[in-house]
Every structure is written in structure tokens, then in C-alpha cells.
Image (spheres, rainbow, N blue to C red):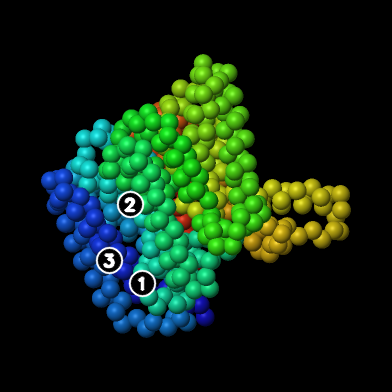
Amino acid sequence: MVQGIRFKNIFSIVGKILYLLAFVQIIPLAIAFYYNEPTAPFLISIAAAGLFGIILGYASKDKKDKEDEWTVRESYAAVAFSWLFSAVFCAIPFFFSGLTAFDAFFESMSGVTTTGATILQHIDTYPKSLLFWRSLTQWLGGLGVIALFLAVIPKVNMRGRQLYKMEFSGPTEDKIRPKIRSTAKILWYFYIGATVLLVLLLVILELPVFDALTYSLSTMSSGGFTAHDQSILPFANFKVEIVLIIFMLIAGMNFSLIYKTAAKGLKYLTKDEEFKLYILFFSVISIILALVLFRDMNYSAGESIRYAFFQVGSLITTTGYVIADYGQWSGAAQTLLFVVMFTGGCSGSTAGGPTFVRWIILLKYARRDIFKFIHPNAVKPIKYNGRSLNEEVVNSTISFMILYLLVFIVSTVLLGILELDLMTAATASIATLGNIGPVFGMVGPFGSFSEFSAPARLVMIFNMWIGRLELYTVLLLFTREFWKK
């Protein structure tokens, strides 16, 4: 008989996640002290997260820590609820800074899922400590709250392997070391190191230290929250834009592949099919967009190249930075950007979206089917990076892509029913499902999501949640079979 879900197991993980969230809020609390800003929002949040962490820890204290007592269903539930509760408790500083409870939850969910869709208006008027917290929520969510948990909590054993698989649920294996905790620690070391390097470069390029910090956190997480109303525009610094393009592309790469390349040589990078398609797609679409902008928008050749490469880099990595009001661009230019929004970065990165590896598998699957029309009896396995893929992996990839498209269509229809025009509904749907952020239409790339109705934002919150966890981890919770004994 199938064993029922034991909530003590889930409480144990969520409680430890809340401890970590309480601890990291010491940083924005210190910034509030430094700038003489209100500290109550963070003190209350630290107390609330710590208290609920203690309560959940107490509720699970008699759980036996045996590997055979941790089921796959409990892993799915633990990951899904960890992200949901992270969004709830990360919202507390926003709530006590003046936002309504619903707006605070939207901003928080957008942060932890690295979507970057903001509810705030006149961003520059908010306390620096709160703006730092926005960027920090994205940075924590970029690599993942579960990955952070695995890196700092010892003795996770079977739980660790299952939780890692649920949070990094792509079709390829991205482990660096046999032990999951070692893999998580290496990923975090790289993530922290790249973030620090970006901070230093931006400071050298004469950005204020605070801006360098917040933009670095948002860039490496592929999040896109900024400390200014007009995203990147206030800097008007070409060198800063170049650096941000490079680091956005790095954040959109497979971190495990970067580590292996650094340890064993460039052959791992140059032979990786996903990386090659990622760079090729970015380059080709950027060049085409530059030509379209030069033709349609009366930009100079330099401006066309600058805007095209930055905006494609921002959307392909799902960062969502904006360098120009592309809501005013021609239909051809907007169509290219809309296509980019369906790609995502590489698997094992901080980028959202379907990821390029799934598109590769989908295209190879279609090619094999065409081949079988000519040779119906041929056995032709699908290969990725020179290795034959298990048919189960291929089928799950096809299933994911169909489900991704279905969720996009359903949420677009729901947003249309809620009186959004088609362009706004479609781009808001894919921007939240792919954790991208800015939209076309009613709000525009520089606009606030406060202009959307509460029901529309509820649809978007759900999209952000399921999109960050690649659909299945959350959608399984809404099936009757998941909860059956």
C-alpha cells in the first residue's frame, strides 16, 4: 500500500528554510541602521520567520531521520511549500513598509522567483534597505532556497538528493560531485564569486556602491529588480551595459558546465550543444533585431546594435532589464522579442523559461519522426552531447513543452477574460510563467503591475510560482492522486 504524506517531514524542511530567511535579513537590517531608516519591518520579519521556524521545528522534532522514511511525494511538497512560504515571509518587510498584504505578496513572489515584475511606483522614494531586500530576495531565489538549504545544512542524505532533483528538475544531470551537498556548495561558491566580481567591476565603472550591489544581485539571479524607476536608463553608461550583457549571459549558462570548463578545459564548453545553440541564437536574433531597428526606428547603426544586443540578452536570460521603451518599437521588432521570451537560458542556470536543452530535444524528436516516415522500421535514438537519451527523458521533455504551452494559453485566456487586451494578456502570461518580468501593451516595459486588477495579478502570482519550479512540482499538489494514501 502507498504510504500517505507525513507532514512532519515537510514541516522540518520549511522550518529550516525559515531559519535561513530570518538569518539573511540581518543584512538589510544593518543597511537600515546605516542609512537611519525604519528597522521595524525587518525586526518583525526576523521575529516572525524565526518564530514560525521554531514552531515547525517543534512540530517535526520527533521525526526519525531515516532515508527510507522520505518519499518522493514529500520531496515535491517540501520544495513547493518551501518556495510558497518563502514568498509569504519575504513579503513581511514590504507589508510593514506600507504595501497592502496582497501587493507585498506579489512583490515578494516576483522576487524569490526572479521574475522582476514590480508592483512599486516611484521606486527611488522607497528606503534603500527595502530596495536592497528586493534584490536580495532575487539573489536567494536565483540559485534556489533549497540549494542554499542543502549547502549549509549537514546530513541531508536521501532527502538532499530528492530535494535537489525537485528544484533542478531539468532533463539533464547537473551534479558536479557525487554528494549533493558538495555540488550545492560549489554552485554557491561560484555564484557568490561571480556576484562579488560584478560588484567590483560596476564600482570601477563609477556606479555608486549601493547601485553596484543591487544591480549585481539582480543580474546574477537573472531577476531584474532595480533601485530606479527606469531600469538601466539612469546610468546611460555604455561600458556598464557591456558588463551587464556579459554577466547576464554568464548567469544564463549552465553553472555546472562553467565549473567543468574551468576545471578541465574549454572542450566541455565548445562541445556542449545547449551552450552553442544559446550563443548562436543570441547572436543571430540580436543581429536581426539590430537590422530591424535600423530600418524601422530611425536609430543609428550604433544605437541599433546597442539596443538589440542588450535587450535580447536581457530577455533570453529572463533578467528583464530594459534599455529602451520597446513598447514603442515596430511590430517586427516586438515580434522578435516575443519569440525570445519563449526560450529561456540554459539548464542549471538562474534563468527561467523552458531552457534551450528542451528545445534541442524537441527539435531532434521532430526530426526523428520525419525520418521515420521514410524509414518506418529504423531504430534511431535521440542523442544529446554524443549520448543517447533515455526515451523516458525524451517523453517527459515533450510532455513538459506541451504543458508549458497549455499553461501559457490558459493563463492568456484567463487574463483576456479579466479584460486585458490580447497583447498585454499574452506577454503578461509568458513574462510571469517564464519569470521574465516586463510586458508589452497596457503596462509597457517601464510600467508597474499595480495597474492590473487583483484577479489578474493572482493569475500571475500562480504563473510565477509554477514557472520557477518548472510546472510539475507545484501542479502535482493540485491532483487528487498526490494526496491519496
The local secondary structure at tag 2 comes to helix
Please, what is the three-letter code of the amino acid marked with disc 2?
Thr
The crowd level at tag 2 (other Cα within 10 Å; few <14, some 14-19, many 20+) is many
Which residue is rendered at x = 81% and y = 50% of the image? 371
In this view, the residue farthest toward the top is 298
Residue 61 figure quarter: bottom left
Which residue is rendered at x = 32% and y = 58% of the image? 86
**Alpha carbon separation for disc pair 1 and 2:** 20 Å
* Residue 469, percent from left and from top: 46, 56
> Which residue is disc 3 drawn over?
19
**N-terminal label among 2 and 3:** 3
**N-terminal label among 3 and 1:** 3
The local secondary structure at tag 1 comes to loop
- The one nearer the camera, 397 or 116, is 116
> Which residue is disc 2 drawn over?
137
**N-terminal label among 1 and 2:** 2
Which residue is rendered at x = 27% and y = 56% of the image? 89
In this view, the residue farthest toward the front is 204
Residue 397 at least partly seen: no
- The one nearer the camera, 64 or 16, is 16
Front of the two marks 3 and 1: 1
* Residue 148, percent from left and from top: 38, 63
Please, what is the three-letter code of the amino acid marked with disc 3?
Tyr
- The reply, left or right, for residue 406 in relation to residue 205 is right
> Which residue is disc 1 drawn over?
153
**Alpha carbon separation for disc pair 3 and 1:** 11 Å
Which residue is rendered at x = 60% and y = 50% of the image? 275
* Residue 2, percent from left and from top: 51, 77
Please, what is the three-letter code of the amino acid marked with disc 1?
Ile
Residue 349 at least partly seen: yes
Task: Kindly indicate whether the residue at mark 1 contacts the one at mark 3 (C-beta within 8 angstroms).
Answer: no
Task: Kindly indicate whether the residue at mark 3 contacts the one at mark 2 (C-beta within 8 angstroms).
Answer: no
